Amino acid sequence: MEFREYWNIALRRGWIIILVAIVAAVAALGVSFLMPKTYKATIQLSVNPARADWGLSQATKDLLRNYVLNIKSHRMTQEAIDRAQLDMSTYDFLANLDVSEDSSNLSITIQAESHDPEEARLMAQTLADVFVEERAQWNAEQDKRDRIYVTKVDDIRDVPLASPKPKFNMLAGAIFGAIVGGVIVFFLEWLNADLLQSVADVEKAVGVSVLGAIPAGSESRSGAKRTWGLPAWVDSGLALTFLVGAIIGAALGALIVGLL
């Protein structure tokens, strides 16, 4: 294909790409507003050995994974639930909890999610307090040179919205909608590849110039054939393409929000 042919296809079918992209973006935005809001509270713990000793530092790095395991235990989460007076089970608590370690800076990150920002804050903050206090009690029984201190880097100051993200979802819906619209256009062009729709198509197919053409017959507006109960001036193929594009765009937008 020459560039002009691609350009003609874009002019003729470009509305399909735009339609699917717009519908997908609007659907993603609409679903985002219908979804319940989820907030995420994050707090970091710093783990430091009592002395700058290579062996103790390596032991501290190895202990980080064990600390994460203890924080995510039913025993510790139950203590956090009791202290914060949260109305949930340890299973619910753990399902909305994420704990990770970073050996490069000897830190542990605790993240808790909830539809209530205050509940998310209490979950993360209280669990961090419980663990810090437990490690302080353990250190009190150790030699000062062998202690490993765990402290909070900072208390939780704000609890941002984790999901949904309407602007991001709308943009993602538009991008993926445009891609799907392009696939639809490619499919339609593939279906019509063997059809001769213009004088130029005929000349290109037979290799000779066309000297004349028989004009297509015309019907009066009053006697025009109606398809699917639509007005005579509405092209049934165009209406079907519009409907399919709208449905695909809406489904794609909802799917994107669900995945993101």
Image (tube, helix red, strand yellow):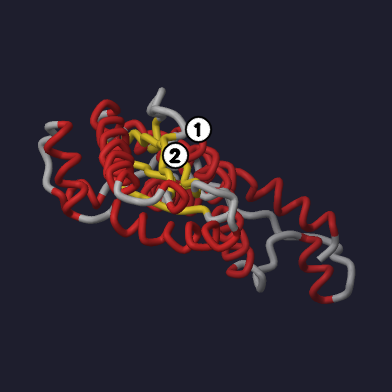
Q: Position of residue 77 (x, y in %)?
A: 20, 47
- Can residue 124 be spotted in the picture? yes
Relative to 87, does residue 198 appear above or below in the rendering? below
Q: Residue at x 50, y 59 (%)?
A: 61
- Can residue 115 be spotted in the picture? no
Q: Residue at x 66, y 73 (%)?
A: 194
Q: Position of residue 260 (x, y in %)?
A: 43, 48
Q: Amino acid at mark 2?
A: Gln
Relative to 104, does residue 164 appear above or below in the rendering? above
Q: Position of residue 115 (x, y in %)?
A: 26, 34
Helix, strand or loop for disc 1: helix
238 or 226: nearer the viewer: 238
Q: Which residue is mark 1?
A: 167
Q: Which residue is mark 2?
A: 44
| Left or right: where 241 falls relative to 77 | right
Q: Amino acid at mark 1?
A: Lys
Q: Residue at x 54, y 51 (%)?
A: 176
| Left or right: where 220 falls relative to 225 | right
Which residue sits furthest bottom? 206
Q: Position of residue 96 (x, y in %)?
A: 27, 47
